[in-house]
Amino acid sequence: MAKWALVAHGGAGVIARGLLSPAQDEAYREAMGRVAQAGAAVLKAGGAALDAVEAAIQILEDDPLFNAGRGAVFTAEGDIELDASIMDGTSLAAGAVAGLRRTRHPISAARAVMAHSPHVFLGGEGADAFARSRGLEQVDPSFFFTERRWKSLVRELERQGLAIPPRPSAPPAGLDERAALAHDEGKRGTVGVVALDTEGAVAAGTSTGGVTAKRWGRVGDSPIIGAGTYATHAAGAVSCTGAGEYFIRLSVARTICALVELKGLTLQDAADQVVQRDLTGLGGEGGVIAVAPDGQMAWSFNTSGMYRARVADGQPLQVGIYKDDP
Ligand code: ASP
């Protein structure tokens, strides 16, 4: 039985072999592997699953390849609104934020809500204000800007026949080369990490910019406990990515845990049942990653690809992108 284990995803979507250039393929594999190893280093040193989840997600949030933090997608109004959540399987404590515009690491804001507020879910300006009050790094919204995501927004607004907002000014210099490698998975993307630590505790976290050209304060599954993120010592920890509206309606993360806890399914069977049968049956697309207190690791997705990596005590790092990757 693995003493510790960690699984990470960088979003699911239209990620078919041949759509990524060799340079993109390499960049995503390198990033996923590096993030998994960074999280694993925390666990190997005896660190908590929650710390591994937060540390690994912070790296993904800073990487413009992924739709979370820096490099996130734009709303129809040309803003960037970030959502995140985190959950501790031991205590069932959880924290979530939606619509952040200034907090550099939304996952840390979610953790602060969990640890330092009487609440579970904060949204909008209040969520940024809370993060600021906790001393979390605040940035100008232009920090999150990437040219590639801006172009995706313009394309999507043109497709929908919507007005194109003024281009935000002063994007930071120096990001473009890496951001230009970002693959357009089709409007979406998210990052998530689940971990089991040497104390036997599991935790899950998820962070996203949501969906390109979202409007009206739209919030997806990622910051919703039970939908995009869930963790319980009785079953495991789950993080999701995909068409949020479907994940919310199926309470995907909680349902996977319930199938393990109440019906005795293996983690992989539970993940497959919810993704391949329920989600696919409803017409939703996406994927999940999961880890159980006994060291089981699982992933399941019904899209052409999902950026993913897993590593555990005594098991080598495994990185995948496409459906037919091992
Ligand atoms: N689940 C995210 C959302 O609906 C997007 C994604 O994971 O692709 O906001």
Image (cartoon, rainbow, N blue to C red):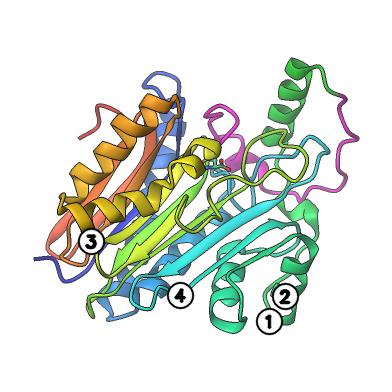
Left or right side of 182 for 124? right
Q: Separation of disc 3 and disc 2 at Cα? A: 32 Å
145, 75: nearer the viewer: 75
Kind of residue at disc 3: Ala
Q: Which residue is mark 1?
A: 134
Q: Quadrant of ligand 1?
A: top right
Q: Nearer the viewer, mark 4 or mark 1?
A: 4
Q: Which mark is residue 130?
A: 2
Q: Nearer the viewer, mark 2 or mark 1?
A: 2
Residue 16 versus residue 136 in the image, above or below: above
Kind of residue at disc 2: Phe
Residue 304 visible: no
Magenta span contains residue 175: yes
Of the image marks 4 and 1, the number of the one nearer the N terminus = 4
Residue 237 versus residue 42 in the image, above or below: above
Q: Are marks 2 and 1 in contact (CB under 8 Å)?
A: yes
| Secondary element at tag 1 | loop
- Where is residue 306, by image quadrant? top left
Kind of residue at disc 4: Ala
Q: Which mark is residue 292?
A: 3
Q: Separation of disc 4 and disc 1 at Cα? A: 18 Å
Q: Which mark is residue 230?
A: none
Q: Which residues are magenta?
A: 163-188
208, 269: nearer the viewer: 269
The location of residue 42, given as percent across then percent down, is 34, 74
> In the picture, which quadrant includes the N terminus?
bottom left
